[in-house]
Amino acid sequence: MTLVRRALPGDAPEVLRLRQVMLDSVSGGGDAGNWHGESLPALRARLADPEGTFAAFVVDHPERPGALAALAVGTAEYRIGRESNPRGVVGFVFSVATDPGTRRRGYARACMDGLLAWFRERGARQIQLTASADARPLYEALGFEPKPDPLMELRV
C-alpha cells in the first residue's frame, strides 16, 4: 500500500524539484530552475495553510529519506455557479510528477487519488487539468475526459 500524505512546509524544496521534473518533461528542458528561490516562501506559506484553496499530496521517496517520489498539486477555486455546478467550486490540477527513478509504481495515481478526495471534500463538482500524451492514460483511467479547449492566455 502506498502512503500518501498532505505536503508540509518543509517539503517545499522537494515540491519545487518535482515541479521542475514535470516542467522539463513538458518543455524538453532548458529551464535552469533559477526561479525556485523566489517561489519558495510563497509555496511554504501555502503548504502551511491546511484550510486554504491549495493542496499538494505526496509520496515519500522509498530510498532517499527527505526526498519525495511523487506529487499531485491543485487548487480549488470559486467560479459563479451554473446548472452542472451550482456551488461553483472547480478543482484545477496543475502539477503531477514522479521522480524518474520511482516511476511505474503507482505513486502518481495514489497522489491523484488524495487530491481528488480533497477536491470532493471542498464540494468541487468539476476538476480540470491539461495532460501530456504520456500522462493521458492515467487521467483517463481516473475518469477524465478530453474537452475541446478554447483556452487563451495573456502574459503580463
Image (spheres, grey):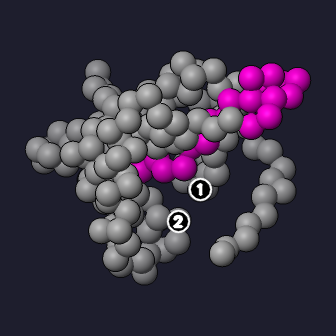
Q: Earlier in the sequence, mark 1 or mark 2?
A: 2
The label shown at residue 132 is: 1
Q: Amino acid at mark 2?
A: Val
For the C terminus, the image quarter is: bottom right
Q: Residues within 10 Å of mark 2 (few under 14, many from 20)?
A: few
**Relative to 97, is 28 above or below?**
below
Q: Position of residue 15 (x, y in %)?
A: 33, 51
Query: Which of 36 and 114 lies nearest the eye of the viewer?
Result: 36
Residue 55 counted in the magenta span: no
Which picture quadrant has residue 59? top left
**Relative to 70, is 5 above or below?**
above
- Circles 1 and 2: CB atoms closer than 8 Å: yes
- Which residue is located at x 54 percent, y 18 percent? 121
- Which residue is located at x 73 percent, y 71 percent? 154
Asked whether residue 64 is in view, the answer is yes
Q: CA distance from mark 1 to mark 2?
A: 7 Å
Q: How many marks?
A: 2
Relative to 106, is 112 on the left or the right?
Answer: right
Q: Which residues are magenta?
A: 79-104
Q: Position of residue 61 (x, y in %)?
A: 21, 43
For the N terminus, the image quarter is: top left
Asked whether residue 21 is in view, the answer is no
Q: Residues within 10 Å of mark 1 (few under 14, many from 20)?
A: few
**Residue sitting farthest toward the right:** 83
- Which residue is located at x 34 percent, y 32 percent? 6
Q: Position of residue 123 (x, y in %)?
A: 63, 21
**Relative to 130, is 144 above or below?**
above
Relative to 137, is 2 on the left or the right?
Answer: left
- Say which residue label 2 marks: 26
* Callout 1 secondary element: loop
**Relative to 49, is 120 above or below?**
above
* Callout 2 secondary element: helix
